[in-house]
Image (cartoon, rainbow, N blue to C red):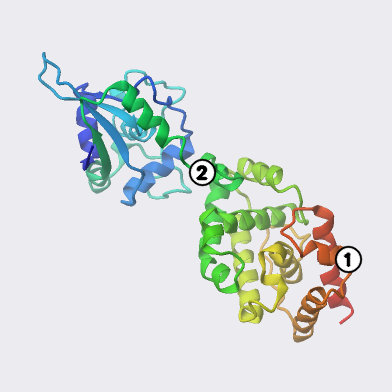
């Protein structure tokens, strides 16, 4: 097996010469949605890495004397690139399935433009992009190739729900929550809310997604998986109020960090098990949980009295002096609606009587 690099233009040339077999029998068929295709082209334009492509050398054509190559893994990536640049080279091109352009949410500069409509510099950058490629020898038979292909597609750990959403959606809602979660990465770590293992499995993205959707719903939510699946699908193409939500989310995190950022380990509400309710509670104090997200609103900053009450509330829970339902809601990471509502109400009551 040989590791090398090939440019996009190499694959286009091979497709034009009919020396590239895109879809062997053991390959999955082209199923990418337009959002995934748009995201790939933007990745290439930005010269960011994508997963390695596997090819197998085939015996040269005795008539044309051209070497033949077969795609073992990477058909959907290559098909997307060829579709964008030279769709006429695809023998099974489908007008109802294959055409796409880059989405505004991925790259405003390229949005809605075909490859031919890009300027020379952008077209050249795409053609010169280098794929990392493993090339299998031509004497490797189909049984060995199929075994390699199946190993590559069966030894990965099972994807969790958030990783599955990441693989399925590429639109407005996903882009929003991924950017917000990434902006707060230093805080997630410093506060001790998430460790590197949880971050690698997108736990902080899932929490950000749930908070943002709760801003939209204007209420505390439960039944996590179903709610988030609805959010990603419903706001994939259009996301009204996105700019306001992003501004409010950032303001909430600034407020938390300014007042409690140095209290990791002592303030219960910075821990993952209580963070969802705490974010919604601070949001409610600053903007009002039941206010629409389509209008801008000036934030209310926490008073010294409110800050003291929040710290005392944390202490009561830790010392088991809070109601049983409230303590139970903070002893584990919970999606139970009643437990979340109990904790939220407890916090509001503590501030009301401070």
State which tag comes first along the sequence, 2 or 1: 2
Return the x and y of residue 221 as percentages of the image width and height.
Answer: 76, 53
**Disc number placed over residue 324 in the picture, else none:** 1
Query: Which quadrant would the N terminus be assigned to in this image?
Result: top left
In the picture, measured across the screen, residue 257 lies left or right of residue 273, that is: left
Asked whether disc 2 touches disc 1, contact meaning CB atoms under 8 Å apart, the reply is: no
Query: Which quadrant would the C terminus be assigned to in this image?
Result: bottom right
* Near-viewer residue (335 or 1): 1
Q: Secondary structure at mark 2?
A: loop
**Disc number placed over residue 157 in the picture, else none:** 2
Q: Secondary structure at mark 1?
A: helix
Return the x and y of residue 324 as percentages of the image width and height.
Answer: 88, 66
Binning the other alpha carbons within 10 Å of mark 2 as few (below 14), some (14 to 19) or many (20 upward) gives: few
Residue drawn at the location 84% of the way across and 66% of the way down: 326
Residue drawn at the location 47% of the way across and 42% of the way down: 156
In the picture, measured across the screen, residue 322 lies left or right of residue 177, that is: right
In the picture, measured across the screen, residue 311 lies left or right of residue 102, that is: right
Return the x and y of residue 208 as percentages of the image width and height.
Answer: 62, 58
The single residue placed furthest to the top in the displayed view is 63
> Quadrant location of residue 8?
top left
Binning the other alpha carbons within 10 Å of mark 1 as few (below 14), some (14 to 19) or many (20 upward) gives: few
* Near-viewer residue (156 or 267): 156
Return the x and y of residue 322 as percentages of the image width and height.
Answer: 87, 72
Count of number-bearing discs? 2
Is 155 drawn above or below residue 90 in the view shown? Answer: below
The single residue placed furthest to the bottom in the displayed view is 304
Mark 2–mark 1 Cα distance, whole angstroms, equals: 38 Å
**Disc number placed over residue 246 in the picture, else none:** none
Residue drawn at the location 78% of the way across and 75% of the way down: 318
Q: Is residue 179 visible?
A: yes
Q: Is residue 100 visible?
A: no
In the picture, measured across the screen, residue 173 lies left or right of residue 134, that is: right
């Amino acid at each position: 097996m040989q590791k090398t690099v090939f440019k996009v233009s190499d694959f286009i040339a091979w497709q034009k010469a009919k020396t590239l077999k895109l879809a062997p029998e053991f390959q999955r068929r082209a199923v990418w949605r337009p959002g995934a295709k748009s995201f790939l082209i933007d990745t290439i334009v930005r010269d960011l890495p994508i997963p390695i492509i596997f090819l197998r050398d085939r015996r040269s054509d005795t008539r044309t004397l051209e070497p033949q190559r077969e795609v073992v893994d990477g058909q959907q990536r290559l098909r997307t690139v060829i579709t964008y640049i030279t769709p006429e080279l695809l023998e099974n091109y489908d007008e109802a399935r294959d055409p796409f352009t880059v989405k505004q949410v991925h790259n405003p500069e390229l949005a809605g433009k075909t490859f031919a409509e890009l300027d020379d510099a952008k077209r050249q950058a795409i053609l010169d992009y280098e794929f990392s490629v493993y090339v299998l020898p031509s004497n490797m038979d189909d049984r060995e190739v199929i075994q390699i292909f199946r190993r590559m597609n069966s030894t990965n750990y099972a994807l969790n729900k958030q990783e599955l959403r990441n693989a399925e959606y590429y639109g407005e809602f996903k882009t929003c929550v991924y950017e917000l979660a990434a902006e707060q990465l230093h805080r997630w770590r410093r506060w001790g809310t998430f460790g590197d293992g949880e971050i690698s499995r997108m736990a902080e993205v899932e929490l950000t997604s749930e908070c943002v959707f709760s801003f939209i719903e204007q209420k505390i939510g439960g039944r996590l998986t179903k709610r988030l699946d609805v959010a990603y699908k419903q706001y994939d193409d259009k996301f009204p109020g996105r700019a306001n939500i992003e501004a409010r989310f950032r303001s909430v995190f600034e407020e938390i960090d300014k007042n409690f950022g140095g209290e990791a380990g002592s303030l219960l509400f910075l821990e993952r098990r209580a963070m969802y309710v705490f974010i919604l509670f601070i949001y409610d104090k600053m903007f009002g949980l039941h206010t629409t997200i389509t209008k801008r609103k000036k934030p209310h900053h926490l008073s010294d009295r409110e800050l003291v009450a929040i710290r005392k509330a944390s202490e009561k829970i830790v010392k088991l002096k809070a109601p049983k339902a409230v303590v139970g809601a903070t002893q584990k990471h919970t999606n139970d609606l009643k437990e979340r509502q109990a904790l939220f109400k407890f916090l509001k009551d503590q501030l009301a009587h401070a």
